[in-house]
Amino acid sequence: MKTGFFLTARLGSTRLPRKHLLEAGGRALLAVLAERIVGAFGNELASGEALLAVVTSDEAENRAFERVVPVGASVFYGANANIPLRHHQAAQALGVDAVVAVDGDDILCSPAAMRLVRDSMRLGADYVKTSGLPLGMNAFGYRREFLATSVAGNERKTLETGWGYIFDSSRVVERPLELGLNAPSNLRFTLDYPEDYEFFKAIIEHFGDSIATASDREIVSCVLARRLHTLTDSVAEKYWENFHSVQAEEMRRG
Protein backbone atom coordinates (compact mmCIF):
# COMPACT_ATOMS: atom_id res chain seq x y z
CA MET A 1 0.00 0.00 0.00
CA LYS A 2 1.43 3.33 -1.09
CA THR A 3 0.59 6.20 1.27
CA GLY A 4 0.39 9.87 0.44
CA PHE A 5 1.10 12.36 3.20
CA PHE A 6 -0.97 15.28 1.95
CA LEU A 7 -0.42 18.72 3.47
CA THR A 8 -3.57 20.72 2.74
CA ALA A 9 -2.78 24.42 2.45
CA ARG A 10 -3.42 27.54 0.40
CA LEU A 11 -2.19 31.11 0.59
CA GLY A 12 -5.49 33.00 0.39
CA SER A 13 -6.08 33.49 4.12
CA THR A 14 -7.39 36.94 5.05
CA ARG A 15 -6.92 36.67 8.83
CA LEU A 16 -3.22 35.86 8.50
CA PRO A 17 -2.04 36.42 4.90
CA ARG A 18 0.36 33.85 3.42
CA LYS A 19 0.50 32.28 6.84
CA HIS A 20 2.20 29.02 5.83
CA LEU A 21 5.21 30.94 4.52
CA LEU A 22 5.75 32.92 7.72
CA GLU A 23 9.09 32.00 9.22
CA ALA A 24 10.23 30.67 12.57
CA GLY A 25 13.77 29.60 13.29
CA GLY A 26 14.77 30.63 9.77
CA ARG A 27 12.30 28.30 8.02
CA ALA A 28 8.78 28.66 6.64
CA LEU A 29 6.21 27.15 9.01
CA LEU A 30 5.01 24.69 6.37
CA ALA A 31 8.62 23.60 5.86
CA VAL A 32 8.85 22.78 9.58
CA LEU A 33 5.79 20.53 9.28
CA ALA A 34 7.25 18.85 6.20
CA GLU A 35 10.61 18.32 7.95
CA ARG A 36 8.89 16.56 10.85
CA ILE A 37 7.20 14.17 8.42
CA VAL A 38 10.43 13.53 6.52
CA GLY A 39 12.19 12.89 9.82
CA ALA A 40 9.60 10.34 10.93
CA PHE A 41 9.00 8.61 7.59
CA GLY A 42 12.35 8.97 5.83
CA ASN A 43 12.69 5.25 5.13
CA GLU A 44 9.21 4.96 3.65
CA LEU A 45 9.69 8.07 1.52
CA ALA A 46 13.07 6.84 0.27
CA SER A 47 11.74 3.39 -0.65
CA GLY A 48 8.69 4.73 -2.48
CA GLU A 49 6.23 3.24 0.00
CA ALA A 50 5.12 6.79 0.75
CA LEU A 51 5.25 10.25 -0.74
CA LEU A 52 4.86 13.78 0.57
CA ALA A 53 2.89 16.47 -1.25
CA VAL A 54 1.42 19.87 -0.57
CA VAL A 55 -2.12 19.60 -1.94
CA THR A 56 -3.42 23.04 -2.75
CA SER A 57 -5.93 24.87 -4.92
CA ASP A 58 -5.08 25.73 -8.51
CA GLU A 59 -4.44 29.43 -8.01
CA ALA A 60 -1.37 31.40 -9.07
CA GLU A 61 -0.38 32.57 -5.58
CA ASN A 62 -0.02 28.97 -4.39
CA ARG A 63 2.93 28.40 -6.74
CA ALA A 64 5.01 29.89 -3.92
CA PHE A 65 4.77 26.54 -2.10
CA GLU A 66 7.23 25.13 -4.63
CA ARG A 67 9.96 27.16 -2.93
CA VAL A 68 9.53 25.58 0.50
CA VAL A 69 8.81 21.87 -0.07
CA PRO A 70 11.72 19.57 0.74
CA VAL A 71 13.63 17.71 -1.96
CA GLY A 72 11.56 14.77 -3.17
CA ALA A 73 8.23 16.30 -2.21
CA SER A 74 5.81 17.82 -4.71
CA VAL A 75 3.00 20.35 -4.98
CA PHE A 76 -0.32 19.22 -6.44
CA TYR A 77 -2.85 21.75 -7.73
CA GLY A 78 -6.49 20.69 -7.67
CA ALA A 79 -10.06 21.76 -6.89
CA ASN A 80 -10.30 25.29 -5.54
CA ALA A 81 -12.98 25.00 -2.87
CA ASN A 82 -13.45 21.29 -2.20
CA ILE A 83 -10.70 19.68 -0.11
CA PRO A 84 -11.84 16.02 -0.20
CA LEU A 85 -12.26 16.26 -3.99
CA ARG A 86 -8.76 17.76 -4.19
CA HIS A 87 -7.42 14.87 -2.12
CA HIS A 88 -9.09 12.39 -4.45
CA GLN A 89 -7.67 14.14 -7.51
CA ALA A 90 -4.21 14.06 -5.95
CA ALA A 91 -4.51 10.40 -4.90
CA GLN A 92 -5.38 9.43 -8.46
CA ALA A 93 -2.72 11.59 -10.10
CA LEU A 94 0.05 10.54 -7.69
CA GLY A 95 -0.92 6.88 -7.57
CA VAL A 96 -1.42 6.45 -3.84
CA ASP A 97 -3.69 3.87 -2.23
CA ALA A 98 -4.27 5.76 1.02
CA VAL A 99 -4.03 9.32 2.29
CA VAL A 100 -2.80 10.64 5.63
CA ALA A 101 -4.45 14.07 5.57
CA VAL A 102 -2.62 16.81 7.45
CA ASP A 103 -4.09 20.30 7.66
CA GLY A 104 -1.35 22.77 6.79
CA ASP A 105 -2.51 24.90 9.72
CA ASP A 106 -1.50 22.08 12.09
CA ILE A 107 2.20 22.92 12.07
CA LEU A 108 3.08 20.48 14.86
CA CYS A 109 0.71 17.66 13.93
CA SER A 110 1.91 14.46 15.56
CA PRO A 111 4.05 12.11 13.42
CA ALA A 112 3.17 9.40 15.96
CA ALA A 113 -0.51 9.97 15.19
CA MET A 114 0.23 9.90 11.45
CA ARG A 115 1.99 6.56 11.84
CA LEU A 116 -0.91 5.12 13.80
CA VAL A 117 -3.29 6.20 11.03
CA ARG A 118 -1.05 4.76 8.32
CA ASP A 119 -0.55 1.46 10.14
CA SER A 120 -4.31 1.09 10.73
CA MET A 121 -5.03 1.58 7.04
CA ARG A 122 -2.33 -0.93 6.14
CA LEU A 123 -4.24 -3.40 8.31
CA GLY A 124 -7.44 -2.76 6.36
CA ALA A 125 -9.20 0.22 7.94
CA ASP A 126 -10.87 2.56 5.44
CA TYR A 127 -11.13 5.68 7.57
CA VAL A 128 -9.01 6.33 10.66
CA LYS A 129 -8.57 9.17 13.09
CA THR A 130 -6.64 9.58 16.32
CA SER A 131 -7.85 11.17 19.53
CA GLY A 132 -6.41 12.23 22.86
CA LEU A 133 -3.98 14.91 21.64
CA PRO A 134 -4.59 18.66 21.66
CA LEU A 135 -6.53 20.17 18.75
CA GLY A 136 -4.19 20.38 15.78
CA MET A 137 -1.99 17.45 16.78
CA ASN A 138 -4.29 14.52 15.97
CA ALA A 139 -4.24 13.00 12.48
CA PHE A 140 -6.68 11.22 10.20
CA GLY A 141 -6.70 9.43 6.87
CA TYR A 142 -8.63 7.31 4.42
CA ARG A 143 -8.12 4.75 1.71
CA ARG A 144 -8.51 6.00 -1.82
CA GLU A 145 -11.54 3.79 -2.58
CA PHE A 146 -13.39 5.04 0.52
CA LEU A 147 -12.53 8.62 -0.39
CA ALA A 148 -13.86 8.15 -3.93
CA THR A 149 -17.16 6.81 -2.61
CA SER A 150 -17.46 9.67 -0.12
CA VAL A 151 -16.72 12.37 -2.70
CA ALA A 152 -19.22 11.00 -5.22
CA GLY A 153 -22.21 13.34 -5.33
CA ASN A 154 -20.38 16.05 -3.39
CA GLU A 155 -18.10 17.29 -6.18
CA ARG A 156 -19.90 20.62 -6.62
CA LYS A 157 -20.02 21.53 -2.94
CA THR A 158 -17.80 24.01 -1.14
CA LEU A 159 -16.01 21.80 1.39
CA GLU A 160 -13.23 23.67 3.15
CA THR A 161 -14.26 23.72 6.84
CA GLY A 162 -15.61 20.86 8.92
CA TRP A 163 -16.20 18.70 5.86
CA GLY A 164 -15.89 15.41 7.72
CA TYR A 165 -19.68 15.14 7.70
CA ILE A 166 -19.59 13.72 4.14
CA PHE A 167 -17.98 10.51 5.42
CA ASP A 168 -19.83 7.48 6.79
CA SER A 169 -19.06 7.83 10.50
CA SER A 170 -19.89 4.17 11.10
CA ARG A 171 -16.74 3.27 9.15
CA VAL A 172 -14.35 5.31 11.28
CA VAL A 173 -11.71 3.56 13.35
CA GLU A 174 -10.66 5.75 16.27
CA ARG A 175 -7.19 5.21 17.69
CA PRO A 176 -6.53 6.96 21.02
CA LEU A 177 -3.16 8.35 22.07
CA GLU A 178 -2.09 9.29 25.57
CA LEU A 179 0.40 12.03 26.43
CA GLY A 180 0.55 11.19 30.11
CA LEU A 181 0.33 14.87 30.99
CA ASN A 182 -2.26 16.84 32.90
CA ALA A 183 -2.82 19.18 29.96
CA PRO A 184 -5.80 21.55 29.69
CA SER A 185 -8.51 20.24 27.37
CA ASN A 186 -8.63 23.51 25.42
CA LEU A 187 -5.04 23.51 24.10
CA ARG A 188 -5.11 24.53 20.42
CA PHE A 189 -2.25 24.01 17.96
CA THR A 190 -3.69 25.65 14.82
CA LEU A 191 -2.54 28.58 12.70
CA ASP A 192 -5.27 31.15 12.06
CA TYR A 193 -4.40 34.44 13.74
CA PRO A 194 -1.26 36.49 14.43
CA GLU A 195 -1.38 35.24 18.01
CA ASP A 196 -1.19 31.65 16.72
CA TYR A 197 1.90 32.56 14.72
CA GLU A 198 3.58 33.90 17.86
CA PHE A 199 2.65 30.65 19.63
CA PHE A 200 4.25 28.42 16.99
CA LYS A 201 7.23 30.73 16.59
CA ALA A 202 7.97 30.55 20.32
CA ILE A 203 7.84 26.74 20.32
CA ILE A 204 9.96 26.30 17.20
CA GLU A 205 12.60 28.80 18.33
CA HIS A 206 12.76 27.13 21.74
CA PHE A 207 13.57 23.73 20.21
CA GLY A 208 15.73 24.98 17.35
CA ASP A 209 16.78 22.24 14.93
CA SER A 210 15.50 19.56 17.31
CA ILE A 211 11.90 20.57 16.49
CA ALA A 212 12.19 18.13 13.57
CA THR A 213 12.27 15.20 15.98
CA ALA A 214 10.66 16.60 19.15
CA SER A 215 7.99 14.28 20.55
CA ASP A 216 4.41 15.27 21.27
CA ARG A 217 5.06 15.01 24.99
CA GLU A 218 8.16 17.23 24.76
CA ILE A 219 6.26 19.87 22.77
CA VAL A 220 3.23 19.98 25.02
CA SER A 221 5.44 19.96 28.13
CA CYS A 222 7.28 22.99 26.73
CA VAL A 223 4.01 24.81 26.10
CA LEU A 224 2.77 24.13 29.63
CA ALA A 225 6.07 24.94 31.36
CA ARG A 226 6.45 28.25 29.52
CA ARG A 227 2.71 28.99 29.53
CA LEU A 228 2.83 29.57 25.79
CA HIS A 229 -0.84 28.66 25.43
CA THR A 230 -1.70 32.00 27.04
CA LEU A 231 -0.48 33.66 23.81
CA THR A 232 -3.62 32.45 22.05
CA ASP A 233 -6.21 32.70 24.83
CA SER A 234 -7.56 35.94 23.38
CA VAL A 235 -8.48 34.35 20.03
CA ALA A 236 -9.75 30.95 21.17
CA GLU A 237 -13.41 31.94 21.28
CA LYS A 238 -13.10 33.83 17.98
CA TYR A 239 -11.57 30.75 16.36
CA TRP A 240 -14.51 28.51 17.29
CA GLU A 241 -17.10 31.12 16.37
CA ASN A 242 -15.59 31.45 12.92
CA PHE A 243 -15.23 27.68 12.48
CA HIS A 244 -18.88 26.97 13.29
CA SER A 245 -20.11 29.94 11.23
CA VAL A 246 -18.22 28.89 8.10
CA GLN A 247 -19.16 25.24 8.55
CA ALA A 248 -22.84 26.12 8.88
CA GLU A 249 -22.71 28.30 5.76
CA GLU A 250 -21.05 25.54 3.72
CA MET A 251 -23.67 23.02 4.85
CA ARG A 252 -26.49 25.49 4.10
CA ARG A 253 -25.25 25.99 0.55
CA GLY A 254 -24.76 22.19 0.33
Image (cartoon, rainbow, N blue to C red):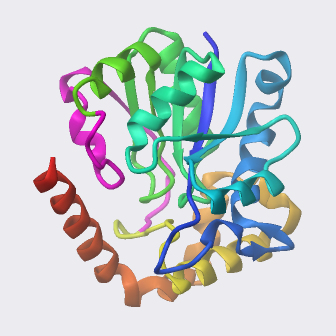
Q: Can residue 181 be seen in the rendering of this structure? A: yes
How far across and how far down the image is residue 227, in percent? 55, 84
How far across and how far down the image is residue 141, in percent? 46, 31
Q: How many marks?
A: 0
At a point 65% along the width and 22% down the height, the residue shown is 94
Among the 4 quarters of the image, the one containing residue 205: bottom right
* Relative depth, front residue between 73 and 225: 73
Q: Is residue 125 above or below residue 26?
A: above
Residue 4 included in the magenta stretch of the image: no
* Relative depth, front residue between 115 and 227: 115
At a point 47% along the width and 57% down the height, the residue shown is 136
Q: Is residue 205 above or below residue 46?
A: below
Among the 4 quarters of the image, the one containing residue 28: bottom right
Q: Can residue 130 be seen in the rendering of this structure? A: no
Q: Is residue 162 above or below residue 88?
A: below
At a point 21% along the width and 40% down the height, the residue shown is 165
At a point 60% along the width and 79% down the height, the residue shown is 197
Q: Residue at the bottom extreme?
A: 234
* Relative depth, front residue between 67 and 40: 67
How far across and how far down the image is residue 24, in percent? 77, 75
Q: Residue at the front extreme?
A: 60
Among the 4 quarters of the image, the one containing residue 206: bottom right
How far across and how far down the image is residue 218, in percent? 67, 60
For the N terminus, which image quadrant? top right
On screen, residue 211 versus residue 110, left or right, reads right
* Relative depth, front residue between 97 and 74: 74
Residue 182 included in the magenta stretch of the image: yes
Find the magenta span and give its range.
155-183
